Image (cartoon, rainbow, N blue to C red):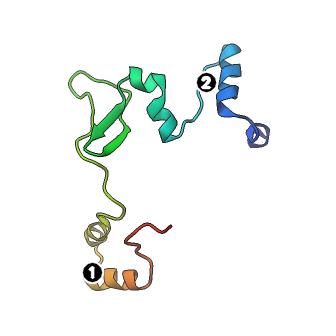
Amino acid sequence: MLNERLAGEDGHELTRRMLAAGLPAGPVLNVDEALRADHTAHRKMVTQLGSFIGLGTPIKLSRTPGGTRAAPPRFNEHGEAVLRARGFSDEEIAELARDGVLVGARRG
């Protein structure tokens, strides 16, 4: 019932109405919106390492404040290593690649 009722709602407008009614609410933001949000800047959540820009944690602990220590892996950067760690042989990995199960680069 909720899916049907909320399917046509704009999250930002619904949030405004809910807050006006005294209900705690917030829209689900995409990454670009979250990076530009006032709250994100206030909480110092934007993190950058080299060319990588992303969202950090909103939770700030004095001894473990969080932050970016490494950029996220590129697409399938560790794919073969993960399969080997799970017991796949080089031959099995090669067969998966030949069969198109493993994808080495993003498609369109």
- Residue at the front extreme, as displayed: 51
User: Is 87 above or below relative to 41?
Assistant: below
> Considering depth in this image, is 90 or 19 the residue closer to the camera?
19
Which label lies toward us, 1 or 2? 2
Compared with 95, 82 (above or below) is above
Where does residue 67 sit, x and y in percent of width and height?
27, 34
Instruction: Please name the residue shown 65% across and 25% down the image.
Output: 15
Locate residue 86 relative to residue 11 in the image: left or right.
left
Picture disc at residue 89? 1
The residue lying at 36 percent from left, 26 percent from top is 59
Mark closest to the chain's N terminus, 1 or 2: 2
Mark 1 neighbour class, 10 Å CA radius: few under 14, some 14 to 19, many 20 or more: few
Q: Residue at x 61, y 20 (%)?
A: 24
Nearer the observer, 89 or 39: 39
Residue 105 image position (x, y, % from top left): 39, 69
Left or right, 11 with respect to 108, comes to right
Q: Are marks 1 and 2 in contact (CB under 8 Å)?
A: no
What amino acid is at disc 1?
A: Ser
Q: Which mark is residue 25?
A: 2
Image vertical order of residue 99 relative to residue 17, above or below: below
**Residue 16 found in image quarter:** top right
